[in-house]
Amino acid sequence: MPTERQMEILRAIRGWIAEHGEGPSVREIGALVGLSSTASVAYQLGRMEELGIISRGARRWHSVRLGS
């Protein structure tokens, strides 16, 4: 079950993809949700990936895909 912060990140990613056609960078996600630490953003993204909420086709988060 995703946390409220993870849901906020997920909404930000969805909006970014709709507008830009690709996933945002870790820094861009941080700016969207008010997290200045890229380590905090990366941690949340890693947890979301473990939960199957998101995935990425490559090492970069620009290739993020939303789960089911």
Image (cartoon, rainbow, N blue to C red):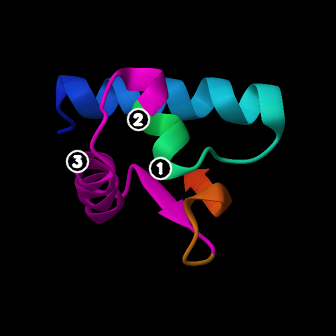
According to the picture, the residue beneath numbered tag 2 turns out to be 30
Return the x and y of residue 29 as percentages of the image width and height. Answer: 48, 37
According to the picture, the residue beneath numbered tag 1 turns out to be 26
Q: Residue at x 26, y 48 (%)?
A: 44
Range drawn in magenta: 31-57
Q: In the rendered structure, are the residues bearing label 2 and label 1 in contact, judged by CB atoms less than 8 Å apart?
A: yes
Query: How far separated are the C-alphas under marks 2 and 1?
Result: 6 Å
Q: In the rendered structure, are the residues bearing label 3 and label 2 in contact, judged by CB atoms less than 8 Å apart?
A: yes
On the rendered image, what quadrant is the N terminus found in? top left
68, above or below 7, in the image? below
- Quadrant assignment, res 51: bottom left
Q: SS of the residue at dot 2?
A: helix
According to the picture, the residue beneath numbered tag 3 turns out to be 40
Category of crowding for the residue at label 2, using alpha-carbon neighbours closer than 10 angstroms: few (below 14), some (14–19), many (at least 20): many
Q: Residue furthest bottom?
A: 58
Return the x and y of residue 27 as percentages of the image width and height. Answer: 48, 44
Q: SS of the residue at dot 3?
A: helix
Q: Is residue 56 magenta?
A: yes
Q: Amino acid at mark 3?
A: Ser
